[in-house]
Image (tube, rainbow, N blue to C red):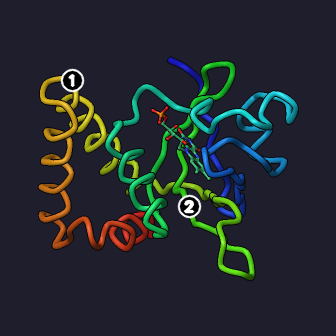
Amino acid sequence: MNKEHVLKNVDIVVSKGNAEGDITYANPIFVKLSGYSMGELLDKPHSILRHPDMPKLIFKFLWDNLKAGNDVIAFVKNLSKDNSFYWVLAHVRVAKNPDGSFRNYVSTRRMVTGGARAVIEPLYAKMLEAEKEEGMSGSLKVLEAFLSGNGASLATFNETMKKLNS
Ligand SMILES: Cc1cc2nc3c(=O)[nH]c(=O)nc-3n(C[C@H](O)[C@H](O)[C@H](O)COP(=O)(O)O)c2cc1C
C-alpha cells in the first residue's frame, strides 16, 4: 500500500489557479506534500495531484460551481509524485479584483477527521463504481442518495461536508 501523509490540525495547504486551473501559487506545505518542486508545479494543471480513487463527479461539481461563481467545500484524496497520498477538506473560492473581474481561484485545504474519512471513503468508492457502470448520472444518483439520507441536497453540499469534518 502506498504511504499516507496525515495533516496536522494546524496545517493549511494553499494553492491558487488561473482560469484554466493551472497552478499560479503554492504554499510551502502544498509543495512538500506534493513531492514536486515549486518549479515542477507552477503553470501545471491542478490535476497533477489527481488521485484515481477520486470520482469524476466531484470535479465536475467543483468546476460547474466555480464557473457559476460559487465556492465549493469538498473532500479530496490527492496523489503525490512518489505515489503517496493525502486527504484534505478543500475550500475552493473564486477571488475577484476590486473592479469585480476574475482574479484567480484559491483553494485552502485542511486535515480530514477520522469520522469524515469513514463516511467519505466508502461514498467515493461507490460513486467511482457507479461511474464505471453507468457514467456520471449513476455517480450523481449515489451522491444525491447519500445527501438526502443526511437530510441534505446538492444545494447544501458545502455545509454537509463541513459538518462531516467537525
Ligand atoms: C484552485 C483549484 C485547486 C484545485 N485543487 C485540486 C487538488 O488539490 N486536487 C485535485 O485532484 N484537483 C484539484 N483541482 C481540480 C483540477 O483542476 C481538476 O479538475 C481535477 O484534478 C480533475 O482532473 P480532470 O479535470 O483532468 O479529470 C483544483 C482546481 C482549482 C481551480
On screen, 93 above or below 24? below
In the image, taking residue 71 as reference, residue 44 lies left or right, namely right
Query: Hey, what amino acid is under mark 2?
Result: Val
Q: Which mark is residue 92?
A: 2
Kind of residue at disc 1: Lys
Q: Is mark 2 within 8 Å of ligand 1?
A: yes
Marks 2 and 1, the one that precedes in the sequence: 2
Residue 14 appears in which quarter of the rendering?
A: bottom right
Count neighbours of disc 2 (C-alpha within 10 A) and say few if under 14, some if 14 to 19, many if 20 or more: many
In the drawing, does residue 88 fall left or right of residue 34? left
Few, some or many residues within 10 Å of mark 1 (<14, 14–19, 20+): few
Is residue 96 placed above or below 63 in the rendered structure? below
Image quadrant where one finds the C terminus: bottom left
Residue 144, placed above or below residue 22: below
Q: Residue at the spot x=51%, y=56% of the render?
A: 89
Between 164 and 58, the one lying in front of the other is 58
Percent position (x, y) of residue 27?
81, 51
Q: Residue at x 15, y 46 (%)?
A: 142
